[in-house]
Amino acid sequence: MGSNQAAVSFLTNIARAALGLGASATILNSSLYTVDGGQRAVLFDRFRGVIDDTVGEGTHFLVPWLQKPYIFDIRTKPHTFSSISGTKDLQMVNLTLRVLSRPEVNKLPSIFKTLGLEYDEKVLPSIGNEVLKAVVAQFNADQLLTERPHVSALVRDSLIRRAKDFNIVLDDVAITHLSYGAEFSKAVEQKQVAQQEAERSKFVALIHLAKLDVMAKWINV
C-alpha cells in the first residue's frame, strides 16, 4: 500500500515538473522574436507606445503581453501605378510609372506611428499621381515625346523629394508607358498621313521635273 502511494506521489511530481517545464518553455518562447535578414523591427509597448529605437537582425527578448514587435521589410521593392493627366494644351495622357522604394531604416518608428506597415501602398500611388499631374501640366502633348528625357528627369526629381517627406527612399523612377487619348492620337495619325502625302507629292514633282529636263536636252540636241 505504502509503495503504491509512493509511486503515485512520484508520478504526480513528474507530471507537475513536466507541466512547469512546459509552461516555462511557453513563456520563454513568447518572450523571444526573430528579425531576419533584410528586415527591421519596431517594438510597441502598451505603456510607452512605439519605442524610438529600430531593432536590427537577430533574436531578441520582449515582455509578453506588454510588448509586441512589428516587422518591416527594408529591401528595395518595385511599385507600378498609372495616372491619367492633362497636358498644357488640354490633351489627356495616360502614363505608367515604375519606382523602386525602401524605407529610411532609422525613421521606421516614425513611419509606423504615422502610416503603419503598409506605408508604401498608402503613400506612393498618391504622391506619384500628384507629381505626374503637376509635371505633365507644364508641357504640350507633343512635347512629352520630343522632350521625354527632360520630362522623366522632372518627374524623378520631384517624386524623390516628395517621398522623402514620408521617410521613403526612391532608388529609381521611370516612366514605362505613355499614350494619348483617342482624339489626339487620331490627329497625330492624320498629320503623319498628310506629311507622307506631301513627301510623295514632292517626290512625284521632282520626277516630273527631271523628265522635262531630259526632254529639253533631247530637243536641244
Image: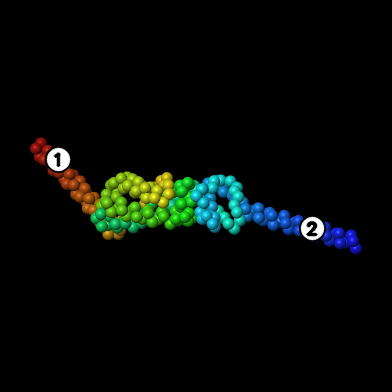
State the residue in front, 175 or 197. 175
Amino acid at dot 2: Asn
Q: Which mark is residue 214?
A: 1
- Residue at x-position 86% and y-position 62%: 5
Q: Gap in Å between the C-alphas at discs 2 and 1?
A: 122 Å
State the residue in front, 160 or 198. 160
Residue behind mark 2: 13
Amino acid at dot 1: Val
- Residue at x-position 51% and y-position 51%: 51
Label 1 element class: helix
115 in relation to 203, above or below:
below
- Point out residue 131 in the picture as x, y percentages from the top left corner: 34, 52
Furthest-left residue in this view: 220
Furthest-top residue in this view: 221
- Residue at x-position 14% and y-position 40%: 214
State the residue in front, 27 or 203. 27
State the residue in front, 120 or 207. 120
Number of numbered discs overlaid on the protein picture: 2
- Point out residue 4 in the picture as x, y percentages from the top left corner: 88, 61
What coloring was used for the rendering? rainbow
Mark 2 in CB contact with mark 1 (< 8 angstroms):
no
Asked if one can make out residue 82 in the rendered structure from this viewpoint, the answer is: no
Q: Residues within 10 Å of mark 1 (few under 14, many from 20)?
A: few
